[in-house]
């Protein structure tokens, strides 16, 4: 059996659609159920529905052979696994954002940056030789500059509508982010006869 970790919600649905196109029976993912472990009718595949941030952990520890997760999560966690494919969907960007007048202060030495991507932000500013204060938030990141908690934010931007509604703009685009296929290192060796053909089918499907 091949075990697959999927992030709950829209990403799971898009992932299941891709698997179906590649000959994997992922119909159970679309069922209205509260079960967290779903097995395909043919018994060949088992799907775990977990929080996006937990997908890399299940794959790293081999509980899941493969998983689909956003590049932003992979950057933040830096887990010991193989990133095999850029699946192209759920595309967005990791950006620095704030009020327009902050554009000239991107290299200011006393910046306060609010983000849930603490590790990624630390690496980013360290690579630039800049020391900043990072404030960790878990939600409504845009509120930080509006209330004065932070000078700017480091966060995912998809449409930019929330930024615009709060008078904020993208100051700098840092990383392109999309869904990625990740694989457990041991599984890629022990289940190569199944995983490698599947990965190749997925590669061809997203390239069409």
Image: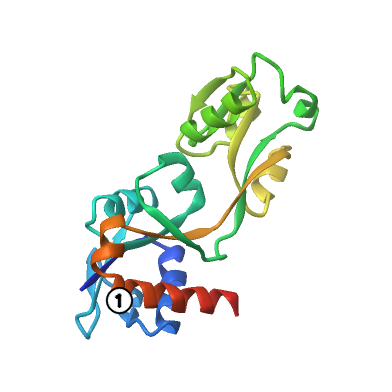
Instruction: For mark 1, give the secondary structure.
Output: helix
- Residue 65 appearing in the image: no
Q: Relative to residue 110, is residue 114 depicted above or below?
A: below
Q: Classify mark 1: residues with Cα within 10 Å, few (<14), some (14-19) or many (20+).
A: few
Is residue 172 found left or right of 16 in the rendered image? Answer: right
Q: Could you tell me residue 11's position as x and y percent?
A: 45, 64
Q: How many marks?
A: 1
**Which residue shows up at 58% across the image and 29% down it?**
144
Q: Residue furthest top?
A: 110
Is residue 61 found left or right of 198 in the rendered image? Answer: left
Q: Relative to residue 88, is residue 202 depicted above or below?
A: below
- Name the colouring of the figure: rainbow
Task: Judge by depth and name the residue closer to the eye, 200 or 148.
Answer: 200
**Which residue shows up at 23% across the image and 56% down it?**
62
Q: Could you tell me residue 77's position as x and y percent?
A: 40, 41
- Look at the image and tell me in which quarter the N terminus lies: bottom left
Which quadrant holds residue 97? Answer: top right
Task: Judge by depth and name the residue closer to the eye, 99 or 195.
Answer: 195
Q: Circle 1 sits on which residue? A: 194
Q: Relative to residue 148, is residue 120 depicted above or below?
A: below
Task: Judge by depth and name the residue closer to the eye, 176 or 31.
Answer: 176
**Which residue shows up at 40% across the image and 66% down it?**
12
Q: Could you tell me residue 100's position as x and y percent?
A: 79, 32
């Amino acid at each position: 059996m091949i075990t697959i970790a999927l992030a709950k919600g829209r990403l799971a649905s898009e992932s299941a659609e891709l698997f179906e196109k590649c000959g994997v029976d992922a119909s159970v993912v679309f069922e209205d159920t509260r079960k967290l472990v779903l097995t395909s009718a043919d018994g060949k595949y088992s799907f775990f529905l977990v929080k996006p941030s937990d997908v890399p952990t299940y794959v790293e520890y081999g509980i899941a052979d493969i998983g689909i997760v956003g590049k932003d999560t992979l950057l933040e966690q830096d887990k010991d696994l193989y990133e095999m494919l850029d699946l192209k969907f759920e595309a967005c960007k990791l950006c620095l954002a704030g009020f327009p007048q902050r554009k000239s202060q991107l290299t200011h030495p006393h910046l306060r940056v609010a983000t849930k991507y603490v590790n990624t932000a630390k690496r980013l500013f360290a690579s630039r030789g800049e020391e900043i204060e990072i404030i960790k938030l878990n939600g409504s990141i845009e509120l930080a500059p509006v209330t004065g908690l932070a000078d700017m934010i480091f966060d995912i931007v998809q449409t930019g509508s929330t930024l615009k509604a709060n008078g904020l703009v993208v100051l700098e685009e840092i990383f392109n982010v999309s869904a990625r296929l990740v694989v457990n290192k041991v599984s890629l060796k022990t289940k190569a006869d199944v995983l490698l053909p599947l990965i190749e089918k997925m590669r061809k499907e997203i390239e069409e």
